[in-house]
Image (cartoon, rainbow, N blue to C red):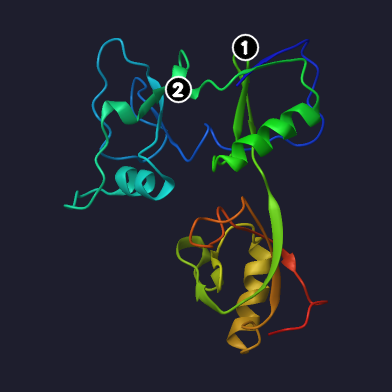
């Protein structure tokens, strides 16, 4: 969505996905992509070097771009699944706003959400502003796992009935919660989780740990 205006700063936080749905970013730069994506068709003359990849839905997009060794059921990526950003692909354009207020942008975000899109991207000149819905939920911990690499010997992630949560913990929190886990006190405690709504099967989308909720009764 194009944003034409006077350069007035947007009130509040603006964050979100790089497109009208669940997309993965791929840039054909002089050396290599900024992300470890796989199975992208080779770049060819005249094609945008900065693209989004979208293969029908979020699950297919992740499977198609993160699978190193192709299986029979791995979704394939064709050039129709690439959305150029150097000159935005017409399929990404949704409309134009002039001097939008926060209420105008929120209204467009609600419109996108009703169509099952994950969020908006507003473009003003060369500036991209990502807008997404965000909500928090209190939920009980059902399990946990030790971290890997630098987090070995402390908490890696916790599990809940809405999926695993591994992002958002500070190093100190990981150590404290790992001690709680080893003492048999972690499962059943309640945490607050921020997410971008839910996936179609009822799991957290991009969950992030916010805080412990000792004021909530343990399960």
Q: Residue at x 64, y 82 (%)?
A: 186
Residue 183, above or below 13 = below
Q: Residue at x 53, y 33 (%)?
A: 20
Mark 1 lies on a secondary structure that is: loop
Mark 2 lies on a secondary structure that is: helix
Residue 87, above or below 137 = above
Q: Quadrant of residue 107?
A: top right
Q: Is residue 109 visible?
A: yes
Q: Nearer the viewer, residue 127 or 100?
A: 100
Circle 1 crowding by C-alpha within 10 Å: few under 14, some 14–19, many from 20: few
In this rendering, the label closer to the viewer, 2 or 1: 2
Q: Is residue 156 visible?
A: no
Tell me the quarter of the image containing the N terminus.
Answer: top right
Q: Position of residue 28 (x, y in %)?
A: 35, 23
Q: CB atoms at circles 2 and 1 under 8 Å apart?
A: no
Q: Position of residue 75 (x, y in %)?
A: 26, 45
Mark 2 or mark 1: whose residue is earlier in sequence: 2
Circle 2 crowding by C-alpha within 10 Å: few under 14, some 14–19, many from 20: few
Q: Which residue is mark 1?
A: 125
- In the displayed structure, does residue 208 sit left or right of residue 65? right
Tell me the quarter of the image containing the C terminus.
Answer: bottom right
Q: Position of residue 152 (x, y in %)?
A: 49, 69
Q: Position of residue 21 (x, y in %)?
A: 50, 37
Q: Which residue is mark 2?
A: 91
């Amino acid at each position: 969505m194009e944003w034409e205006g006077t350069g007035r700063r947007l009130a509040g936080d603006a964050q979100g996905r790089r497109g009208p749905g669940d997309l993965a970013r791929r840039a054909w730069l002089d050396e290599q992509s900024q992300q470890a994506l796989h199975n992208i068709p080779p770049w060819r003359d005249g094609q945008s070097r900065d693209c989004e990849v979208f293969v029908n839905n979020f699950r297919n997009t992740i499977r198609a771009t993160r699978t190193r060794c192709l299986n029979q059921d791995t979704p394939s990526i064709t050039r129709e699944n690439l959305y150029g950003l150097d000159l935005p692909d017409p399929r990404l354009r949704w409309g134009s706003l002039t001097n939008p207020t926060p209420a105008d942008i929120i209204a467009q975000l609600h419109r996108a959400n009703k169509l099952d899109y994950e969020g908006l991207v507003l473009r003003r000149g060369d500036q991209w502003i990502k807008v997404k819905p965000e909500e928090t939920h209190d939920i009980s911990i059902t399990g946990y796992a030790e971290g890997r690499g630098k987090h070995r010997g402390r908490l890696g992630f916790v599990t809940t009935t809405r999926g695993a949560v591994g992002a958002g913990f500070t190093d100190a929190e990981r150590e404290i919660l790992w001690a709680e886990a080893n003492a048999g006190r972690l499962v059943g405690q309640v945490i607050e989780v921020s997410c971008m709504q839910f996936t179609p099967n009822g799991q957290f989308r991009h969950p992030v740990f916010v805080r412990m909720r000792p004021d909530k009764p343990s399960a």
